[in-house]
Amino acid sequence: MMKLIAIILASTLLLACTSTPKTKDYTKFQRNTDSLPLENAHLTIILKAEQLVDFNGVYSSDRSVSQAGMMYSGSAGGAGFLAQILTHAAVTSSSQQSKLNENQKKANKVLAPFKEELNSFRQSELVHKNPNYQFSQTKESGINVETTPMFYLSQDMKNIVLKLLVSVTSEKQKKPIYQNLVEYVSKDVTDKNKVDYWSKNSSQNLKTTSKELYQASLQLAIKDIKNELSSKSSQTKTYRYYTGEALKIERGALVQSNCKRTTVRNLRGWLISFPVEENNQDVTICDSQPG
Amino acid sequence: MKFLSATIACLFILLTTGCATVPQAKVTLNNTFFQQTDKVVGLYVSNLPKNPDTHLYGASCLLCYAVASTANSSLTKHIKTVSTDDLAILEKELTQSLKNEGINVKVIKDKLNIDELKKFSNKDGFHARKDYRSLKEKLNVDKLIVINFKNVGVFRSYSAYVPTSDPMGFVSGELYSVDLVTNRYDLYEPINIKVAVKGSWDEAPNFPGVTTAFFEALELSKSNIMHIFKANQGS
């Protein structure tokens, strides 16, 4: 009986101690837009214009650590034994977090050649004109779409991935009525010298690509907010694409595809949009969707 | 007394070193494999589970394992409902790929009891440790490619009671090809794919992050196996 209690206590405590901390590029998908007429609604896009654009290197999310065995003292009693396990868990959890921080720090070194430009690249440069929405720094009456863009440059500098956190609120409800993440992968840069490509003319290509990615992913998010993105099939399958040389695999249901780009809704409900490989035989129709 | 202790220590060392098995080293596939188009090559996929499972390593005491197992019970319950069909099509895809190279492939569907084969005496690292030669007549093939899956599902490492990794998509096993005349390996490659979850993993009850990492592991193991047979074709 004591053993059973110990197992339940230890498992519960360990579960609480060892779950992954939520990273900034994570959100839980939710939609509660049925009660609101969003089809023709004019939206206000909230973007902190003066804030620096959040640029990162693509990092590894593996935070496993190798650890030598831990010696527990048998004379500590039941409470002492649990305390030892919790201390062990805390030390391990801290090592895991350090490893993840180290992965991110190491990955960000890829941005070194663009450091100066990125230090003055503000979110105001992502603002653009569109008849269906307007930008604001603060919430206004009606439907507000709060956007948090995070850009990731692949380690071989071949492409940029935008992860856009979207949270929709209305003046009638305090809680978000829609919340999601859109991941938008740019097409590959074919120039041999990638540093030159991204940095020339005061990093003009880096800024233009970022702006295009933000615009395209925002429009995709708005379509989803307005419930205009119905899945072509509820059947999930595995999709392969590349961010630079790295093969990426996503599991999800197809939302839209053309000769340039495929968009899927993954198992978390996030929208993932990636360029189609040139030799892909599955796609035939090409429209004006941004590449 | 000292002599007795020394004898016991020597005996213990001899016994324990005698029991240890040296892992099979990698054997790279030679391009001649693809030039022997007159040979019939058997393809056998073994131990592919219909449903995946969680595999907890390092929770080495009984109580530790009970704690680890309980802590991961909802993940285990979920992952057992996911299908491994994506990996099952590997047999078909590899058969087609080899056929495209002009190789006469015969898929072996009947169960082979490889563990029951006799031991093979040549332990130079290039010959199989079991004697596969008896299968030549039985299967009517000249070479046998075996894809042997050992673990398919989710991996999580522990140090006693404490997890040292998040759950990861996991496929392990071995891929090898044996010449049934010489019992020599044409190829030996261990399979060990672990895929970290992007973002948070603790998303009960459907664990979409872990499920995606699992499918990524399936896809990567398939891709690696296909690549091994493709990479050598042109070289």
Image (cartoon, grey):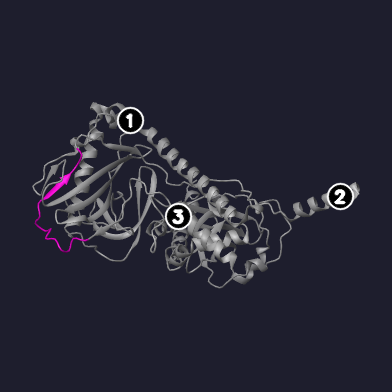
Q: Nearer the viewer, mark 1 or mark 3?
A: 3
The residue under label 2 is: B5
Helix, strand or loop at label 2? It is: helix
The residue under label 1 is: A195
What percent of the width, then of the height, locates residue A82?
56, 54
Helix, strand or loop at label 3? It is: helix
Please tell me whether residue B200 is drawn above or below residue B107 in the rendered image. Answer: above
Q: Nearer the viewer, mark 3 or mark 2?
A: 3
What amino acid is labelled 1 in the image?
Answer: Val
Q: Residue at x 25, y 44 (%)?
A: A148
- Is residue A35 covered in magenta? yes
* A93 sits to left or right of A142: right
Foreground of the two, B170 or A82: A82
What percent of the width, then of the height, locates residue A196?
30, 29
What percent of the width, then of the height, locates residue A219?
18, 50
Subunit that carries the residue with mark 2: B
The quadrant holding residue A127 is: top left
Q: CA distance from mark 3 to mark 2?
A: 49 Å
For the record, the magenta segment spans A32-48
Q: Residue at x 24, y 39 (%)?
A: A210
* B25 sits to left or right of A125: right
Does the image show residue A223?
yes
What percent of the width, then of the height, locates residue A254?
27, 60
Q: CA distance from mark 1 to mark 3?
A: 44 Å
Q: Quadrant of the N terminus of chain A?
A: bottom right
The label shown at residue A16 is 3
Subunit that carries the residue with mark 3: A
